[in-house]
Amino acid sequence: MSIQFEIEDKIKRWIVAERWSYEIVNDPNFHFLCSISDGQNIVFVGIEKKIDRITIHYTADMTPEDQQSYKLSREKYDFWFELKISLMHMEIAVKAIPSIEELKTIDLFSMIYFDAFSQDKLIHSIMKIIDAMGLCQFMWKEFGNSQWSM
């Protein structure tokens, strides 16, 4: 059995042990990809095809109104810088999709390389990315409030 299949099996078992649900997602960039739900959050966990690592993603789509407000804001770069710095302390990376100027989706992610993979590391990383999204939502609310008060 290849290492990817062993890791896939462990991910599935550990998700079930946490009493979370998961659904398999087909994606050509991943050996294995699933969406995990704890009843409130949906996190994606995948085993990449080209690199020996697991990636954990949590995305938030912006409403059209939020996109427009963000696009017109003079403080969007300050918001983005503060968000990146705050998430760096949590060891979470963030990506603006499609760009910082035209924000439509915020993608939070972290990576676990195969040589550091364990049940503790996986579950901790999932929990940490859920907490990071909470921080992101709080910072977005503060940013929005500052825009509307002008």
Image (cartoon, helix red, strand yellow):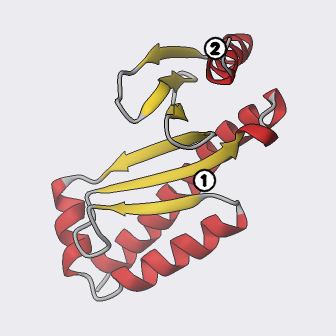
Q: Earlier in the sequence, mark 2 or mark 1?
A: 2
- Distance of label 2 from label 1 (alpha carbons): 23 Å
Q: Is residue 114 left or right of residue 149?
A: right
Residue named by callout 2: 12
**The quarter of the displayed image where residue 126 is located:** top right
13 with respect to 143 (left or right): right
Q: Quadrant of residue 86?
A: bottom right
127 and 93: which one is in front? 93
- In this rendering, the answer to whether 129 lies above or below 90 is above
Q: Which residue is mark 1?
A: 132
Name which residue type carries label 2: Lys
Kind of residue sitting beneath label 1: Ala
Mark 2 lies on a secondary structure that is helix
Please tell me which residue lies in front, 116 or 50: 50
Q: Label 1 crowding class (10 Å Cα cut-off): few <14, some 14-19, many 20+?
A: many
Q: Position of residue 91 (x, y in %)?
A: 69, 60
Q: Is residue 7 above or below residue 68?
A: above
| Residue 44 image point, x, y percent | 49, 33
Residue 115 lies, in percent from the top left, at: 79, 40
